[in-house]
Image (cartoon, rainbow, N blue to C red):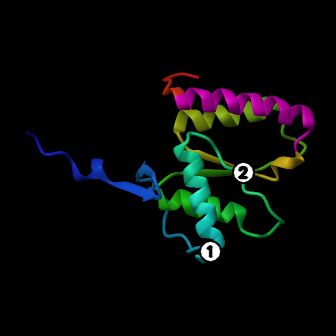
Amino acid sequence: PAEKNPVDKFVVSCANANFEYGFEYQGVSERLVQTPLTDRAYLTLTQALHSRMGGSPFGPAGTGKTETVKALAGQLGRFVLVFNCDEAFDLQAMGRIFLGLCQTGAWGCFDEFNRLEERILSAVSQQILTIQTAVRQGAQEV
């Protein structure tokens, strides 16, 4: 039998969740201080990703939620794009962002997501549900 490429076997594990390493090099980044809270956040987020869902870290401003998501993405070799949501975000803008994320396979981190208008949040939740359903079903198109 032919030897498999060892790169194809590179897997990152966290509890019962296994992820193929993404090999997205983003330069040498600063290390996040590892605390019991970041460990718990990593475990929660990886379990959600293993279930083909997303995560929504919650807490006071300036506590490192975005940095934790960026650090986890880096450890899994994934590209993450951070968007600072404000009143200027409309449904079309969010649709374009989701389209780009789906096409590239990048992670999206939406800072200040709660600042979006209620009608936008409602429509965006439907878009996210459609994407998550497609991912869970292994669909090639959304």
Outermost residue, left side:
1
- Location of residue 71 in the rendering, given as x and y in whole percent from the top left corner: 57, 64
Q: Which residues lie in the magenta part?
A: 116-136
**Local SS, label 1:** helix
Give the side of residue 25 with respect to residue 49, left or right.
left
Which of marks 1 and 2 precedes in the sequence? 1
Disc 2 residue crowd, few under 14, some 14–19, many 20+, Cα 10 Å:
few
The label number, if any, that marks residue 56 in the structure image: 2
Judged by its main secondary structure, the magenta piece is helix
Asked if residue 34 is positioned above or below residue 22 in the image, the reply reads below
Is 119 colored magenta in this rendering? Answer: yes
Element marked by disc 2: loop
Residue 36 place in picture, x, y as percent:
62, 74
Question: Per the image, is 85 magenta?
Answer: no
The residue under the point 54% across, 31% down is 136
* Amino acid type, label 1: Pro
* Crowdedness near tag 1: few (<14), some (14–19) or many (≥20) residues, C-alpha within 10 Å: few
Q: Position of residue 7 (x, y in %)?
A: 28, 52
| Residue that carries the numbered disc 1 in the rendered image | 36
Q: CB under 8 Å between callouts 2 and 1? A: no
Mark 2 → mark 1, Cα distance in angstroms: 18 Å
**Residue ID at (56%, 39%):** 52
| In front of the other: 134 or 84 | 134
Q: Nearer the viewer, residue 10 or 90?
A: 10
